[in-house]
Image (cartoon, rainbow, N blue to C red):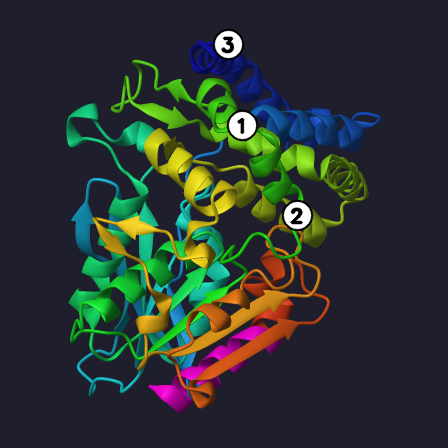
Amino acid sequence: MLYHLHEMQRSLLTPLMQWADASSKLFANPVSPLAHSPFSQRIAAGYELMYRLGKDYEKPQFDIASTEIDGATVGIIEEVIVTKPFCRLIHFKKDLNGKAALKQAKVLLVAPLSGHHSTLLRDTVRSLLAEHDVYITDWTDARMVPLAEGAFHLDDYIFYVQEFIRLLAPDLNVISVCQPTVPVLAAISLMASAKDPKMPKTMTMMGGPIDPRESPTKVNNLATEKKFSWFENTVIYSVPSNFPGAGRKVYPGFLQHAGFIAMNAGRHAQSHREFYQHLVTGDGDPAEGHRQFYNEYNAVLDMPAEYYLETIKTVFQEFSLPKGTWEVGGNLVRPQDITNVALFTVEGELDDISGAGQTQAAHKLCSGIPANMQQDFVAPECGHFGIFSGRRWRELVCPKITAFIKQHA
């Protein structure tokens, strides 16, 4: 019922938001007479802030048209390699105009299925492209998947990852960011146990809850303080009839977004106040930066209910991976069986989503990997998003990942 009420509210607010957007332009555009009236900048700023607080945010585009390689600009063609009901595998192909193919390490970037779209890793992709051949998992908004396609479980996530690895292997390097570190480690562990010949060369795990018992955060505490039944009865709703996935049980994106905002409400409020002031003073660059960030941050997707609930139970309540009790398809997940895949873990010093030591725990679990094939890095003064986006990602983290891949791939 809550989802239906949300959609009704969205429908009612849409005309108001369109009016606010149009009014903002009328008071800001220099060719409009209203732009020369008293307090026009403040009025325009107020209308734009209203519009951005109330509008519906669509999935952004990657919008990566080119990259720089050895001082030359190379075009990028975004092509879909595999299309599955709940995911697309996208290749950022370099347009070489008939030139010889580049000898670059192949990278599968496994994006989170945890609220935001895979475009959240746009900066990650852009930085990797100069020296790597990049592929990414583009997870589908569950409300757009017809009910006839069936359910999507945590095991299915693992099987998807395995399928993509086998498609791109053997000369492949896997990078997982945040949530997928756990299913990616499970996928590679199961392949190792089965002696699969198409193993990746390296696996890089960034800011993920391999063992959430280490330095628990607010996110971890919520999962342990609430009973499993609370999640089933409180955050799971059916998709309304105006979407292709009508009737599918999901954890709605708008509820996830409310949780994101609540975690740092003061910080977001201050950001919007500063945005208003930048608009009033005509400070265009910071205002545009605010727009770009929240265009991404406010664009959320619905997660399949079964996948979300199984993740809560398996990862955050039962700690099945570090305890060695996790079974997938009747097979025990044994990270210790991995012997020939180099492991690199990355954490942020100030990460308030995945606490210190949660990702590093992978090293203890992967006891079969020789010490000279393991590496860890804690990015100084880096929060959760900083380890895969922004200046510190580009200057500190990405070069280390590139060097690690060159060393072991």
In space, the residues marked 2 and 1 are separated at their CA atoms by 17 Å
- Residue tagged by mark 1? 227
Residue 110 visible? The answer is yes
Q: Is residue 155 above or below residue 370?
A: above
Q: Nearer the viewer, residue 338 or 12?
A: 338
Q: Residue at x 56, y 52 (%)?
A: 212
**Which part of the image, by quadrant, shows the C terminus?**
bottom left
Q: Are marks 3 and 1 in contact (CB under 8 Å)?
A: no
Q: Amino acid at mark 1?
A: Lys
Instruction: Name the residue rendered at 61%, 42% in the picture.
Output: 219
Q: Amino acid at mark 3?
A: Leu
User: Residue flagged by tag 2: what amino acid is it?
Assistant: Thr
Main secondary structure of the magenta stretch: helix
Please report the bounds of the magenta region as a residue range: 395-409
Front residue of this view, candidates 370 and 80: 370
Vertical relation: 252 (above or below) 138? above
| Image location (x, y in percent) of residue 247 | 28, 17
